[in-house]
Image (cartoon, coloured by chain):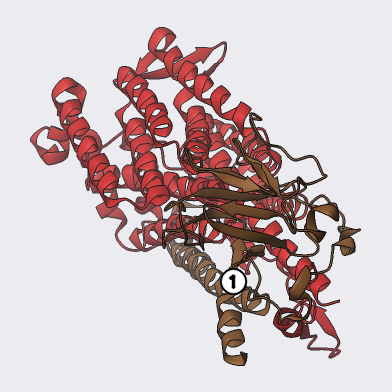
Chain colours: A brown, B red
């Protein structure tokens, strides 16, 4: 192509390239904004999204939503705030590990009992497990459908703090705190065998899962 | 435990909306979202076809004509493969595709040999990106990986100090047979993963020690540009994990002290600062590179001189350190702003992914990847336009260099891996909502 013709073409095409570049940027921005809106809408329709269950204070019967990872303690910065004697500001950390349960890792010097046994470095709580933190006793409730091992009945029926019949990891075992969760390929089956809600809670209104639901439940009460 | 009451009533199972055509309910998300690039991919492909065709008309080279067909096809195929098989984020992929094809075009424009090398780097980089996605998705034994990465990282950074050779004042290059590479680019990935892991375990001291070790080795290499990136990423990740302004302040003060030390201890730093302050003092000597860059940018104006009509090749190292000046010269300042906007979008997307992450590790890794990309872009573009003194870092995905291209795509791969895990979290929530409604 001769030089003069190419110059004219190239000078015209620079506006086309500018338009394409600007459109890529603007469409990217629009896609992010729309996706953010879609995400928010979807999360609103799934009010328990991001949570894996709840933890109930057996004394006050106050329930707190359980996120995937966080800490339990007396500090207002904790994800699950509990108050009572011998409860530290940040008493223990937790992380949900699919296939294992809720991994409880007490902070240095903090004592945590899991179903009557003291946790050393870490332990796994399952649905219905009882945690004793200072003077507080907390009950763990996990959503149906989560991939966790089944818990034996004896540990729940009497609630007297007997050791869980299932093997639990405890003292001295070095476990991976940030154990990663593989993407599932199959629908989880067999999760419907979870035990019914324990004791007096069987007829009680469903515990609050999200902030909006807590507010609504208070209104209903 | 079955979910009852409010939750089940409100959700009633999966979220549904009506199909516009048949009125039958269908699920939100799922396949329709998985394969969407928001219309960006067709624009990228159009850009590739038109730009390479124009290059063919300029040079008459059939390689350019071949690229006009091959590049859009390859990018389209890779996009679909990554989305379907690796659950990669569509927006990030589309933006990465645009930047990679722009980088290919700029290299092809001046030298076909470099263009082919760049194309090969892109293909290898995409493979590495896929590997990084899988690694983040499925890695479990971080108690084993993290120490290995730490020791490996330090070892790799030590190698150039002992056996490396100097390029432009920095002794950060290693030659193994026919291949020359920069170990700090590979260690960048280990630095991100290890720092995220240690900070998620609240091991601030450990993270600090690892980062300081890397910085010390980079100082020994006299690779201050890369040291600046490592420092910036560590500082931001520490602040995000602790929320402590005091710690951030101490980090900034330490960085300032390090900068002063670097200025006094290294003569090439003094030279670069002097050139930055007044390149016109020696426009044909030490200041030649910056002066030519500024002239090229000014020559380009808002709309550029046109593809193939620029003369930015007079700038020394125009194909890697000053590729942004070449872009401004031929495509114009407005196009350059759009490209910078795209880098910013990548950073914003990383923050969005971090906010949605379920675990602290995922969130920190996403933040680290976003900061890495944005900070590197800022440092090199700032050097090109004389906003800050020039450093030896490359512009991600645009600059010539196999190591740089592969490591940038790997950083994006780590981010994509976190995005895939976030997606999994949402799928799990939908699944649980469906089961709770039964």
Residue extending farthest top: B162
In the image, residue B270 above or below residue B104: above
User: In the depicted view, which residue is nearer to us: B389 or A182?
Assistant: A182
In the image, residue B372 above or below residue A218: above
User: In the depicted view, which residue is nearer to us: B176 or B417?
Assistant: B417
Query: Residue A52: x and y, percent?
Result: 68, 62
Query: Residue B394: x and y, percent?
Result: 41, 37
Horizontally, residue A22 falls left or right of residue B63, namely left
The C terminus of chain B: image quadrant: bottom right
Query: Residue A210: x and y, percent?
Result: 60, 74
The N terminus of chain B: image quadrant: bottom right
Q: Identify the image quadrant of residue B424.
A: bottom right
Q: Secondary structure at mark 1?
A: helix
Query: Residue B175: x and y, percent?
Result: 50, 13
Other-residue count near label 1 (Cα within 10 Å), few / some / many at <14 / 14–19 / ≥20: some
Horizontally, residue B388 falls left or right of residue B364, namely left
User: In the depicted view, which residue is nearer to us: B206 or A182?
Assistant: B206
| Count of all numbered marks drawn on residues in the image | 1
In this rendering, does residue A167 appear at all?
A: yes
Q: Residue at the spot x=64%, y=75% of the render?
A: A47
Residue extending farthest left: B281
- Chain name for mark 1: A
In the image, residue A4 above or below residue B197: below
Q: Residue at the spot x=63%, y=29% of the render?
A: A172
Horizontally, residue B169 falls left or right of residue B274, namely right
Horizontally, residue B333 falls left or right of residue B348, namely left
In this rendering, does residue B55 appear at all?
A: no
User: In the depicted view, which residue is nearer to us: B367 or B275?
Assistant: B367
Q: Which residue is mark 1?
A: A35
């Amino acid at each position: 192509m001769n030089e003069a013709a190419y110059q004219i073409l190239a000078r015209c095409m620079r506006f086309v390239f500018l338009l394409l570049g600007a459109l890529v940027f603007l469409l990217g921005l629009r896609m992010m904004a729309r996706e953010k809106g879609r995400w928010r809408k979807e999360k609103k329709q799934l009010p328990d999204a991001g949570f894996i269950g709840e933890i109930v204070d057996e004394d006050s019967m106050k329930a707190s939503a359980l996120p995937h990872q966080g800490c339990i303690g007396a500090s207002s910065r904790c994800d699950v705030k509990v108050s009572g004697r011998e409860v530290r500001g940040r008493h223990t950390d937790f992380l949900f590990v699919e296939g294992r349960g809720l991994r409880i890792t007490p902070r240095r010097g903090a004592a945590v009992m899991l179903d009557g046994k003291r946790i050393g470095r870490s332990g796994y709580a399952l649905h219905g497990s009882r945690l004793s933190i200072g003077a507080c006793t907390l009950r763990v409730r996990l959503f149906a459908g989560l991939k966790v091992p089944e818990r034996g009945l004896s540990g729940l029926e009497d609630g007297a703090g007997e050791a869980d019949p299932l093997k639990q990891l405890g003292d001295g075992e070095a476990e991976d705190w940030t154990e990663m969760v593989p993407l599932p390929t199959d629908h989880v089956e067999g999760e419907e065998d979870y035990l019914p809600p324990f004791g007096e809670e069987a007829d009680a209104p469903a515990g609050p899962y999200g902030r909006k639901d807590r507010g609504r439940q208070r209104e209903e009460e | 435990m079955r979910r009852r009451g409010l939750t089940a009533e409100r959700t009633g199972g999966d979220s549904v909306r009506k199909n516009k055509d048949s009125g039958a309910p269908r699920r939100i998300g799922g396949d329709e979202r998985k394969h969407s690039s928001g219309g960006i991919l067709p624009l990228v492909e159009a850009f590739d076809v038109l730009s390479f065709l124009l290059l063919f008309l300029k040079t008459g080279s059939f390689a350019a004509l071949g690229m006009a067909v091959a590049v859009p096809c390859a990018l389209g195929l890779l996009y679909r493969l990554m989305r379907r098989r690796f659950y990669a984020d569509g927006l990030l992929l589309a933006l990465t595709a645009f930047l990679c094809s722009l980088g290919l075009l700029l290299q092809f424009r001046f030298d076909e040999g470099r263009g082919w090398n760049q194309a090969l780097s892109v293909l290898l980089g995409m493979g590495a990106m896929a590997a990084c996605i899988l690694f983040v998705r499925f890695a479990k034994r971080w108690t084993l990986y993290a120490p290995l990465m730490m020791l490996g990282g330090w070892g790799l950074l030590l190698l150039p100090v002992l056996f490396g050779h100097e390029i432009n004042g920095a002794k950060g290059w290693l030659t193994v047979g026919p291949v020359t590479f920069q170990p700090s680019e590979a260690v960048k990935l280990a630095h991100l993963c290890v720092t995220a892991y240690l900070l998620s375990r609240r091991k601030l001291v450990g993270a600090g020690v690892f980062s300081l070790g890397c910085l010390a080795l980079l100082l020994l290499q006299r690779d201050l540009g890369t040291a600046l990136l490592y420092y910036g990423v560590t500082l931001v990740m520490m602040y995000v994990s602790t929320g402590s302004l005091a710690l951030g302040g101490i980090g900034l003060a330490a960085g300032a002290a390090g900068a002063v030390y670097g200025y006094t201890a290294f003569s090439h730093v003094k030279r670069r600062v002097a050139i930055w302050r007044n390149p016109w003092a020696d426009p044909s000597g030490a200041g030649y590179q910056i002066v030519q860059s500024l002239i090229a940018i000014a020559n380009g104006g808002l709309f550029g001189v046109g593809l193939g009509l620029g003369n930015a090749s007079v700038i020394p190292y125009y194909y890697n350190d000053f590729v942004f000046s070449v872009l401004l010269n031929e495509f114009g300042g407005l196009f350059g702003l759009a490209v910078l906007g795209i880098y910013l979008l990548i950073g914003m997307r990383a923050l969005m992914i971090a906010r949605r992450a379920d675990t602290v590790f995922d969130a920190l890794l996403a933040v680290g990847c976003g900061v890495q990309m944005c900070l590197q872009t800022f440092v090199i573009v700032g050097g090109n336009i004389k906003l800050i003194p020039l450093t030896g870092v490359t512009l991600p995905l645009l600059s010539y260099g196999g190591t740089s291209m592969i490591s940038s795509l790997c950083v994006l791969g780590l981010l994509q891996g976190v995005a895939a895990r976030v997606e999994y979290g949402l799928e799990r929530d939908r699944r649980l909502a469906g089961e709770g409604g039964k």
